[in-house]
Amino acid sequence: MHIPGIIHRSDVDDLDLEPGQFATWLREGSVRSVQPWYVTAAAPPDLVAILQQGVRPTCLDAAALHGLWIPPRPDAVHVFRPRRARGHRRARGPRADGDNLATASPIRRRGGKRLGTPQAPVPLLHHGPALRSWPDTAPVPPLPLVLEHAARCLAAVDAATLFESALEQGRVTDHQAEQIVASLPHRQRRDLGRIRRGAGSGTETTVRWWLESLGVPVRVQVHIGTVGRVDILAGRRWIIECDSREFHDDEQQYARDRARDLELQFLGFRVTRLTWEQVFVSWRTTRPMLLAILRRGDHLRPPAPSRIRAV
């Protein structure tokens, strides 16, 4: 994966530069050496801080750089490096350098933009790949390897969020996703057997997986009359719309959403709109209320007839 402001040493000769130009940049400090790369001020500082420690990001942190939806798990920075010698692999978990634990700030993006201010440094979580050398010279590994690491590391619903985001964005094909899942141990293969296209956001994937785990019939991206597509239809009449944004500043979209909700209520549907915060920040409060709706059977009663068309 190409990252602006970072170039591998082996690629410097391919630059169309005047003789001595690169050496001048190094002397002036506009380019500096970081492990096997040269970096400029355009390089993302959070990524450079990881590369300086001789590791590369993977799992959640690399997926963020690839532009996927990322569940908020800020307790560690996920990194990897190949085995140093046959039969030797680094321990999984924070690595001690003398008396100090290696740390870095988590890499979090949405739509290519950093979310808020940089987070406080947290321990590095070392993945243990079977690789004996780096897969390429890029500072961020290819997406299939990132997804494999995520599937072996994260809870199934978090890994599914990355897989479904990659599928929805066309970053991997169905066949590629199936190949990655097929290479996993039995438990991960079983747990990730429900990944599919059609998820509009990581919030939607998380809610759908929770409903499916309870045995609730779920359909996604369903077309409802003149309203258009809705995120989730649980049972026969419960529509759940999932906000994909952590921050909300579009007043026109807010108005359109409420107009849609009113029309859906008019057609006989029950509508619940869940925010990013309700799913990822206050789920312990949100979940009991959703369970109460399910136990009442509100989702089982049919709406007005002939209003639903699957897309």
Image (spheres, helix red, strand yellow):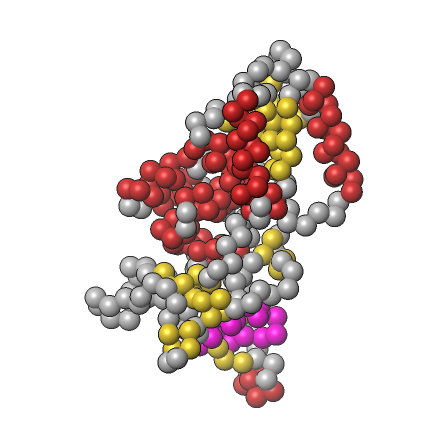
Is 256 situated above or below 234? Answer: below
Q: Residue at x 62, y 60 (%)?
A: 114
Does the stretch in magenta take in 37?
Answer: yes
Is 164 situated above or below 212? Answer: below
Q: Residue at x 43, y 66 (%)?
A: 124
Name which quarter of the figure residue 17 lies in. Answer: bottom right
Is 199 situated above or below 134? Answer: above
Q: Residue at x 33, y 41 (%)?
A: 189
Instruction: From the top left corner, tell me how far across and down residue 195 is, in percent.
Output: 44, 37
Instruction: From the top left corner, tell me how far across and down residue 39 is, in percent.
Output: 54, 75
> Could you tell me how many numbered marks the image carries?
0
Residue 14 in view: no
Q: Residue at x 64, y 64 (%)?
A: 117
Q: In the shown orientation, is residue 128 left or right of residue 214?
A: left
Quadrant occupied by the C terminus: top right
Q: Residue furthest bottom?
A: 27
Q: In the shown orientation, is residue 88 left or right of residue 289?
A: left
Residue 278 in view: yes
Choose between 74 and 143: the one closer to the eye: 74
Instruction: From the top left corner, tell me how far across and down residue 131 is, in percent.
Output: 30, 61
Q: In the shown orientation, is residue 148 left or right of residue 3?
A: left
Q: Residue furthest top?
A: 305
Name which quarter of the figure residue 242 lies in. Answer: top right
- The part of the chain drawn in magenta is 35-52
